[in-house]
Amino acid sequence: MDGSVVSGAQGTHWVEVARLEDIPRLGSRVVATATGDIALFRTSEDIVFALDDHCPHKGGPLSQGIVHGQAVTCPLHNWVIDLNSGEAQAPDVGCVKRTPVQVQEGRVLLALRA
Ligand code: FES
């Protein structure tokens, strides 16, 4: 990871991990962190979400799924994961860990543990 630390709060630091233009619209980009791969998803409205790149079903790579609205469909067995909550859409049950993310002047920042 080549980001820079820009601020900190509650044991975490906001770390620049990408630029918005690095993430394709309705696509994703994977960021390797000390706690595992995090997938950045960008919606058609340029909202960015950060979730573990690990489907709650059988660990499929969500970063290779289809982004639609504010959800992603896992490429392996088509579970639909809400990007806001990380929850699988019913009737499936499971949750993906989310990481706080913000976009500032085109820079994508993640709240990562120091
Ligand atoms: S691993 Fe994602 S739906 Fe099965």
Image: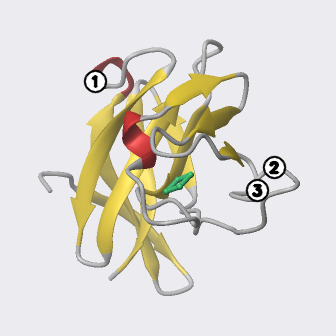
**Badge 3 is on which residue?**
85
Label 2 SS: loop
**Badge 1 is on which residue?**
22
Q: Is residue 10 above or below residue 4?
A: below
State the separation of the CA atoms marked 3 and 1.
24 Å
CB within 8 Å, label 2 to label 3: no
**Given the current orientation, which residue lies at the most extreme left position?**
2
In the image, which is nearer the foreground, mark 2 or mark 3?
2
Q: Quadrant of residue 18?
A: top left
The residue at the point 49 percent across, 35 percent down is 41
Residue 113: give x, y in percent of width and height.
39, 80
Question: Which part of the image, by quadrant, shows the C terminus?
Answer: bottom left
The reply to whether residue 114 is visible in this rendering is: yes
User: Could you tell whether 92 is left or right of 104 in the image?
Assistant: right
- Three-letter residue code for mark 3: Ser
Q: Nearer the viewer, residue 82 or 112?
A: 82
The reply to whether residue 82 is visible in this rendering is: no
Residue 62: give x, y in percent of width and height.
45, 46
Q: Nearer the viewer, residue 20 or 23?
A: 23
